[in-house]
Amino acid sequence: MKIIEPSVELIDFIDGDEILKKIERCGRVCYQSQPKDDSAEKFVRMLIKRGHESVLEHVSLTFHIICDRAIQNELVRHRHASFSVESTRFVKYGDLEVIKPERIKFDTPFFFDWQNAILYAQNTYEALVECGLPPEDARDVLPLCLKSELYMTANLREWRHILKLRTDKAAHPKMRFIMNQILGIFKEKLPVIVEDFQ
């Protein structure tokens, strides 16, 4: 068993100015207005403030996300996003990579109980495969904290929706951790898209 940290990586090259110019161009057709010098950021800000976010759908971003299976199961519910997900059916697992819940602290009885449950699941999985059960059936004993790797693509409007939901204090702590990383990338690369977020 190996405990790993969840992570996020933006895989697209981002030219924030060009993205804003594209959104501006798409949005100005609605008003039949012409862009002015350096007007893209101001125009996009105005669109978002007015709730005219459909123009944000013309730009999509893809993130490489490492999380656990439970969080992955929540992420794929966002039906306006596209996903490519590590398959437990076709991957044969050896030493399990897992993500520890942040509420379970090392050197506590909870940690040792959690660790023992993971090791038991790993041993059971390996024994089932050794006995000839296909990995696609043996996977039924794998824990929800098993590391999952996925690519997630969504347009900017959908990312705003996802980030509003999944950075909220009511969201699961592991989900908030992932989404706050994505929000941080937006704040760095395309701040006008999320500047109205708290």
Image (tube, rainbow, N blue to C red):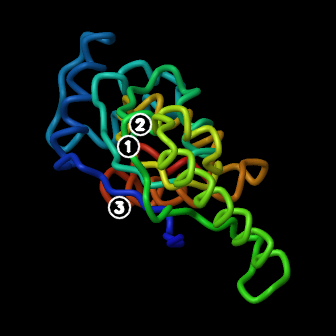
* Image: 74 above or below 190: above
**Residue type pointed to by label 2:** Ser
Q: Earlier in the sequence, mark 1 or mark 3?
A: 1
Q: How dense is the environment of label 2, judged by Cα within 10 Å: few (below 14), some, or many (20 and up)? A: few
SS class, disc 1: loop
Q: Earlier in the sequence, mark 3 or mark 2?
A: 2
- Whether label 1 touches label 2, CB < 8 Å: yes
Residue behind mark 1: 91
- In the structure shown, which secondary structural element does the residue marked by tag 3 occupy? helix
Q: CA distance from mark 3 to mark 2?
A: 32 Å
Q: Which residue is nearer to you in this view: 98 or 138? A: 138
Q: Amino acid at mark 1?
A: Val
- Quarter of the image that includes the C terminus: bottom right
User: In x, y percent, where is residue 89?
Assistant: 44, 33
**Looking at the image, residue 148 lies above or below residue 6:** above
Q: Residue at x 30, y 20 (%)?
A: 27
Q: Position of residue 166 (x, y in %)?
A: 63, 45
Pointers 3 and 2 in contact (CB under 8 A)?
no
Q: Secondary structure at mark 2?
A: loop
Taking depth in this image into account, of 181 and 98 the one nearest to the observer is 98
Q: Nearer the viewer, mark 1 or mark 3?
A: 1
Foreground residue among 32 and 139: 139
Residue identified by numbered label 3: 188
Q: Position of residue 109 (x, y in %)?
A: 85, 81
Frontmost of labels 3 and 2 is: 2
Which residue is drawn at the image coordinates 30% and 38% (left, top)?
61
Identified at 65% across, 45% down, the residue is 141
Residue 87 image label = 2
Q: CA distance from mark 1 to mark 3?
A: 35 Å
